Image (cartoon, rainbow, N blue to C red):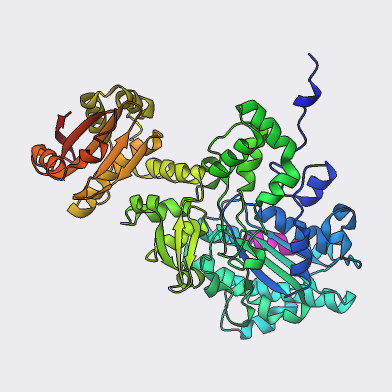
C-alpha cells in the first residue's frame, strides 16, 4: 500500500552524535553554530555541565567539525556568515560517553587509545625515552602524569612541525568517575593527565569539556588550568536544548502532525509539549529550553510519553539517594536554595547536599530568583521529569525481591477508583512486606519511608496527591482525590488508628470539601515499627 505524502516524516536527528553524519543525511538541525563561533573566538578553555541526553555530545562534535575545518558541513548555517578561515587544527577527542570505567585501568587504556590515534593522525612516532628523564624527576609518578608528558610531547612536536596548536575536546568527563569502583585512583589519573592543560598551554588552541555534574571538577582541573565554567552563564543558557522560538521555527510541521494525531489545536499541542518537556532554566536571566531528546521522540512517535526515564536516570544519583535521609516529598512543592551554593558546588564525597546534584542531573531547575536573598526556588522542570524521578525512586528503594511478583499499579488504581479501602490497604500491606528498610533502626526515618510509599503509589498512579496538606487547624498527612472520592489519610506509628481518625475530625480536615459532591473517606492508619508494616486501619465516611 502506498504511503500518503502527509505521512512521510522529515528526518529527525534522533541517535545522532556526529554532526558531520547528521548534515550528510539531511537531518533537521537546530542551528547552534553561533555559540560555536562565540566560544572559538572568545576564551580558550571551557567547561559545560548539562543533564544526560541534552545535546552535549552533538554540540561537542559540532565543535570538532568546526576545528577540523569541515566547511561543507556548515553551509547555510549561521557560522558561515562569520567564519572565513576554516583552519584544520590537530584534534584530540576524548569520548567518555559510553564504556565500562569501573576499573581505573580502563580509563588509562582509553586515554592511551586516544593518544595513539592522535599520533597516527599527525604522523608522530612516540619515543618514551624523550620524556623518561623528565618524568622520573617528577614527584608524581602516576600513570596519568606519564600520559600527560606523552601528550605534551605530541602537541609540542606538531607545533614545531606545523605551527598549529591542538584542540582538545573531552565529552562526559565525569562518566569514568561516576562509575569507578576506585574513585581515588581514577581521580589521581585524571589529575595527572589533565595537568597537561597547564604545562602545555602554549601548544593548545582550544579546550572544551562536558559533563553531567561538577563532580570533582575543581580538584581535577585545578589552579591555572581551570576551564571557564559556562554552565550557569546567561549567555550560554540555550547552548543545549531547544528554545520556544527554535521549536516554532524548526518543527512546525511536526507540531501540526502531532496535534492532528492527538486531536489538539496547534496552540493546545504547544501547551502540552511545554507541560511535558519544557521548563529547563540554567540561569535566571537565560532562556527556558525543552529537553531535545524527549521532544524529538514525541514528534517521532506522535505521542506524549515519559522518554526521560529510559535515558536520563543517572545511576550515581540513585546511589546517593539510597544513602540519604532527604525527604523527597518536599521537592513536590519546590525548594529554596542559595545561588552561591549551586555555583560553588563540589561533589567530591557522599556527604554533600543532594539538591545541587538533583539540579545538575536535570531533576530540578530554576523556577524563580530572589536577588535580595540570592536564593533560587527550584522545582521539577516538567511532568516527564517528575514522573521519572518518582519511578526511579520506586525502582531503587521499593524493589521487590526476585522471587516476589512485582506490584501492578493498575491494581491499586482499581481499588482507588472503586473506593475499596480494605482492598487498597491490603495491597499496601503486601507491598510493605517486600520492602528493604535501610533506615529500620531509626524511628524517624522509618516513619518517613512508611509515608513515602503511600505518596509514591498514589502519585505514580497519576492521581492528585497533597502530602501533608495544610488546613486552617492543622495539616493532614495526605489527601488524595479521584473523580468520585476524596481520601483523607492520617498516619500514626504504634498507635490506635482511632487516634488518627479523632485528629482528622478534631482538626476538621474534611471541612474544606463540604461543598464537594464526591464521597469523603477519613482513614486512620497505624504502622507498626516492630512489624514494619501496616497493622490496623479505621475508616469513616
The image shows residue 240, relative to residue 27, as above or below, that is: below
The image shows residue 152, relative to residue 63, as above or below, that is: below
Instruction: Name the one closer to the observer, 77 or 427.
Output: 77
Instruction: Name the one closer to the observer, 324 or 33.
Output: 33
Total numbered labels placed on residues in the image: 0
The image shows residue 309, relative to residue 69, as above or below, that is: above
| Residue at figure coordinates x 66%, y 52% from the top left | 243
Position of residue 92 in the picture relative to residue 233 (left or right): right
Position of residue 324 in the picture relative to residue 499 (left or right): right
Picture coordinates of residue 84 (x, y %)? 91, 66
The quarter of the image holding the C terminus is: top left
For residue 331: magenta? no
Picture coordinates of residue 49 (x, y %)? 59, 62
The image shows residue 381, relative to residue 307, as above or below, that is: below
Q: Which residues are magenta?
A: 109-116
Q: Give the dominant element type of the magenta stretch: helix, strand or loop.
A: helix
Amino acid at each position: 500500500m502506498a504511503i500518503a505524502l502527509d505521512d512521510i516524516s522529515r528526518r529527525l536527528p534522533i541517535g545522532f552524535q556526529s554532526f558531520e553524519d547528521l548534515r550528510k543525511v539531511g537531518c533537521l538541525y537546530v542551528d547552534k553554530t553561533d555559540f560555536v563561533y562565540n566560544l572559538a573566538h572568545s576564551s580558550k578553555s571551557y567547561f559545560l555541565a548539562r543533564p544526560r541526553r541534552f545535546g552535549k555530545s552533538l554540540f561537542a562534535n559540532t565543535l570538532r567539525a568546526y576545528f577540523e575545518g569541515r566547511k561543507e558541513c556548515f553551509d547555510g548555517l549561521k557560522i558561515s556568515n562569520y567564519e572565513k578561515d576554516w583552519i584544520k587544527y590537530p584534534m584530540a577527542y576524548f569520548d567518555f560517553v559510553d564504556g565500562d570505567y569501573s576499573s581505573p585501568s580502563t580509563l588509562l587504556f582509553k586515554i592511551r587509545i586516544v593518544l595513539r590515534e592522535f599520533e597516527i593522525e599527525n604522523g608522530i612516532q612516540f619515543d618514551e625515552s624523550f620524556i623518561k628523564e623528565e618524568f622520573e624527576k617528577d614527584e608524581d609518578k602516576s600513570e596519568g602524569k606519564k600520559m600527560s608528558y606523552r601528550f605534551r610531547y605530541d602537541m609540542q612536536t606538531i607545533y614545531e612541525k606545523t605551527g598549529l596548536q591542538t584542540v582538545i575536546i573531552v565529552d562526559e568527563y565525569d562518566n569514568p568517575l561516576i562509575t569507578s569502583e576506585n574513585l581515588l585512583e581514577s581521580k589521581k589519573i585524571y589529575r595527572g593527565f589533565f595537568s597537561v592543560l597547564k604545562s602545555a598551554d602554549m601548544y593548545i588552541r582550544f579546550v572544551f569539556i562536558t559533563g553531567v555534574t561538577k563532580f570533582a571538577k575543581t580538584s581535577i582541573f585545578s589552579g591555572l588550568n581551570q576551564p571557564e565554567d559556562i554552565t550557569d552563564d546567561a549567555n550560554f543558557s540555550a547552548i543545549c536544548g531547544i528554545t520556544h522560538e527554535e521549536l516554532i521555527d524548526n518543527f512546525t510541521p511536526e507540531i501540526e502532525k502531532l496535534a492532528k494525531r492527538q486531536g489538539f489545536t496547534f496552540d493546545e499541542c504547544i501547551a502540552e509539549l511545554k507541560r511535558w518537556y519544557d521548563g529547563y532554566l540554567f540561569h535566571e536571566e537565560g532562556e527556558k529550553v525543552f529537553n531535545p531528546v524527549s521532544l524529538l521522540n514525541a514528534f517521532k512517535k506522535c505521542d506524549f510519553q515519559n522518554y526521560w526515564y529510559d535515558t536520563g536516570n543517572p545511576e550515581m544519583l540513585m546511589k546517593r539517594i539510597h544513602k540519604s535521609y532527604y525527604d523527597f516529598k518536599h521537592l513536590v512543592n519546590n525548594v529554596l536554595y542559595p545561588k552561591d551554593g549551586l555555583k560553588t558546588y563540589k561533589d567530591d564525597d557522599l556527604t554533600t547536599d543532594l539538591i545541587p546534584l538533583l539540579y545538575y542531573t536535570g531533576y530540578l531547575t530554576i523556577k524563580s530568583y530572589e536577588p535580595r536573598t540570592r536564593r533560587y526556588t527550584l522545582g521539577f522542570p516538567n511532568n516527564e521529569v517528575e514522573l521519572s524521578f518518582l519511578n526511579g525512586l520506586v525502582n531503587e528503594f521499593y524493589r521487590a525481591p526476585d522471587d516476589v511478583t512485582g506490584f501492578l499499579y493498575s491494581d491499586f488504581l482499581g481499588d482507588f477508583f472503586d473506593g475499596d479501602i480494605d482492598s487498597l490497604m491490603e495491597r499496601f500491606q503486601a507491598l510493605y512486606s517486600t520492602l528493604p528498610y535501610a533506615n529500620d533502626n531509626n524511628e524517624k526515618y522509618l516513619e518517613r519511608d512508611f509515608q513515602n510509599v503511600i505518596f509514591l503509589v498514589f502519585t505514580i498512579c497519576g492521581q492528585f496527591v497533597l502530602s501533608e496538606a495544610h488546613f486552617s487547624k492543622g495539616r493532614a498527612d495526605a489527601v488524595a482525590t479521584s473523580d468520585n472520592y476524596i481520601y483523607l489519610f492520617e498516619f500514626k506509628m504504634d498507635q490506635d488508628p482511632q487516634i488518627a481518625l479523632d485528629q482528622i475530625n478534631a482538626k476538621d480536615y474534611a471541612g474544606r470539601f463540604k461543598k464537594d459532591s464526591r464521597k469523603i473517606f477519613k482513614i486512620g492508619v497505624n504502622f507498626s515499627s516492630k512489624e514494619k508494616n501496616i497493622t490496623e486501619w479505621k475508616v469513616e465516611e
